Image (cartoon, grey):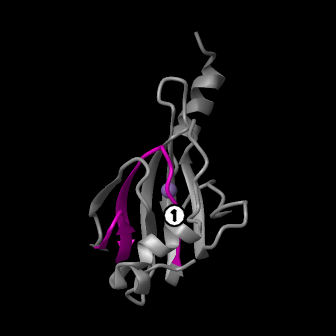
Amino acid sequence: MPTRFEVMNQAMNQVKHWQDGFKWESVPILKYKEEDSHFKNITRQVLFEGDPLLPVQWRYFEIDSEGNSTLERHEHIHVVMIIRGSGNALLGNQIVELNCFDVLQIPSYTWHQFRATNNEPLGFLCLVNKERDKPQLPNAENLEELRSDPQIAEFIRV
Ligand code: MN
């Protein structure tokens, strides 16, 4: 049985109030990635760090106007919900439009890149396994293949 203090403490950690400017109370605004891959104007807030009974991370990413996430693929999958602004994403061999509250699944080993293309930020929640493989970046051959589609060639940022 947890003590009364532990119960109180837990309750405090269980609620993170949303604040103006798409910031959550007591959640630090982090760099998008620590390692040096190609991305621009993007921040990360971790809203849920995972639990043995729910081993996922729930993050909020915000791409500033004209910014982009890394072009990458990996074994793990994402589920994304747009909650601020709009933009576009590369998803496999398609460029998709993203509007507020759209939900997007990114399957295993599917190239993806988000861009804030509409002169406004693109903010989204992204659910991911806590234990996951490291993203792969495109090599010259992958880029050539992606760029064989002119629309994709024009869209991607590396
Ligand atoms: Mn990814």
Residue 54 x, y percent position in the rendering: 47, 29
Quadrant of the image occupied by residue 41: bottom right
Determine whether, in the image, residue 45 is placed left or right of residue 107. right
- Between 34 and 12, which is closer to the camera in this rendering? 34
Residue 95 x, y percent position in the rendering: 31, 74
Q: Residues within 10 Å of mark 1 (few under 14, many from 20)?
A: many
Report if residue 97 lies within the magenta region.
no
Quadrant of the image occupied by residue 150: bottom left
Q: Quadrant of the N terminus?
A: top right
x 50%, y 44%: residue: 15
Considering every residue shown, the one lying at the far bottom of the view is 119
Question: In the image, is residue 118 above or below residue 45?
Answer: below
Residue 52 x, y percent position in the rendering: 54, 24
- To which residue does mark 1 refer? 61
Q: Quadrant of the C terminus?
A: bottom right
Report if residue 93 lies within the magenta region.
yes
Give the amino acid at mark 1.
Phe
Determine whether, in the image, residue 101 is placed left or right of residue 118. left
Residue 86 visible here = no
Question: In the image, is residue 3 above or below residue 86?
Answer: above
Residues drawn in magenta: 68-96
